[in-house]
Image (cartoon, rainbow, N blue to C red):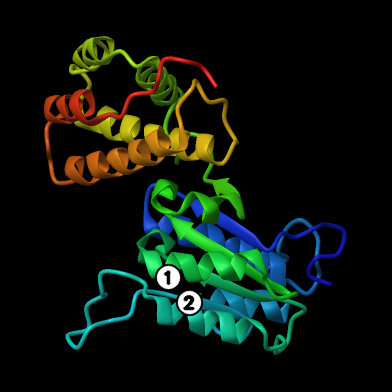
């Protein structure tokens, strides 16, 4: 029914510039999965589509950060929430052929929650589909990302721009070369980028480093430790840029704190 004529994976990452956009894209895909008519698009008219649109479909389960006693979202998604998903995922669907779990702001799962999610993704129950909504895929464990198919919003709406990806690759090659002075010169040459461009570059660096860890992108010669540290450094730069840290400070940080490769490719 819902998956008639096409194959549906068991885990997806939906990445967009905002949490609202990533969740909206994931919810549209959930409607497509649960649609009673099947096909490549949700019909929008069947009972399942209408229930998804109204937020009342029993086989679409949304996981969010819990609220504190003042009604404010807590800082993280915790391990008990993912364990609850694991228990529920083994129960048969109520109406549809599948159960869909939408994890909003999945990049806010704490380390224990991510490890629990990894175990779930390694041995997922039949008929369960997991949709992880993120604004920064680099904050997910590389092992979690490697078990998901990634979907990004339309060109120009999400993901780093082509120029940012090009600069990110230049930076990673400079790091792999093992020449600190050369890396400092490269960072100094980029200091004229504005804050928005620097943020896009930091995002591109994090994505490229994680893709290399997952063997989805050619590696200029950085080891697992260097790539992991670079992804974490890029995430730290993103956080600082979002609280108005200047671009010069960010490139100074990259120049000093970037772990270097041995200079040997591969």
- Residue at 56% x, 41% y is 214
Q: Secondary structure at mark 2?
A: helix
- Residue 33's image quarter? bottom right
Circle 1 crowding by C-alpha within 10 Å: few under 14, some 14–19, many from 20: some
Is residue 208 found left or right of 72 in the rendered image? right
Q: Position of residue 75 (x, y in %)?
A: 25, 69
Q: Position of residue 62 (x, y in %)?
A: 49, 76
Is residue 164 visible to us here?
A: yes
Is residue 140 found left or right of 5 in the rendered image? left
- Residue at 68% x, 88% y is 91
Q: Are marks 1 and 2 in contact (CB under 8 Å)?
A: yes
Q: Which mark is residue 51?
A: none
Q: Which mark is residue 82?
A: 2
Q: Position of residue 38 (x, y in %)?
A: 80, 66
Q: Which mark is residue 113?
A: 1
Is residue 57 visible to us here?
A: no
In the picture as drawn, the residue positioned furthest to the right comes out as 5
Q: 230 and 44: which one is in front?
A: 230
- Residue 51's image quarter? bottom right
Q: 41 and 236: which one is in front?
A: 236
Q: 41 and 4: which one is in front?
A: 4
Relative to 15, say whether 193 is above or below. Answer: above
- Residue 129's image quarter? bottom right
- Residue at 74% x, 81% y is 96
- Residue at 74% x, 75% y is 127
Is residue 54 found left or right of 196 in the rendered image? right
The disc, 1 or 2, on the residue closer to the chain's N-terminal end is 2
Q: Secondary structure at mark 1?
A: helix
Quarter of the C terminus within the rendering: top right
Q: Give the Cα separation between the discs numbered 1 and 2.
A: 6 Å
């Amino acid at each position: 029914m819902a998956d008639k004529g096409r194959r549906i994976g068991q885990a997806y990452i939906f990445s967009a510039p905002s949490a609202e956009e990533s969740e909206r894209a994931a919810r549209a895909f959930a409607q497509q999965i649960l649609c009673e008519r099947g096909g490549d698009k949700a019909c929008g008219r069947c009972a399942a589509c209408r229930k998804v649109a109204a937020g009342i479909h029993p086989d679409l389960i949304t996981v969010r950060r819990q609220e504190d006693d003042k009604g404010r979202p807590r800082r993280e998604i915790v391990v008990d929430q993912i364990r609850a998903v694991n228990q529920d995922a083994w129960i048969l669907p109520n109406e549809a052929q599948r159960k869909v779990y939408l994890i909003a702001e999945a990049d806010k799962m704490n380390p224990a929650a991510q490890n629990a999610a990894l175990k779930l993704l390694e041995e997922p129950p039949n008929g369960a589909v997991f949709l992880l909504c993120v604004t920064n895929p680099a904050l997910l464990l590389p092992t979690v990302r490697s078990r998901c198919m990634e979907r990004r919003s339309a060109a120009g709406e999400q993901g780093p721009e082509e120029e940012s990806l090009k600069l990110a690759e230049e930076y990673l090659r400079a790091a792999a070369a093992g020449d600190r002075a050369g890396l400092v010169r490269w960072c100094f040459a980029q200091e004229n980028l504005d804050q928005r461009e620097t943020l896009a570059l930091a995002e591109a660096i994090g994505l490229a480093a994680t893709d290399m860890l997952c063997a989805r992108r050619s590696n200029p010669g950085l080891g697992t430790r260097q790539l992991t540290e670079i992804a974490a450094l890029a995430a730290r730069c993103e956080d600082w840029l979002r609280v108005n840290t200047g671009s010069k400070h960010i490139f100074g940080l990259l120049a000093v704190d970037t772990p270097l490769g041995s200079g040997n490719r591969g």
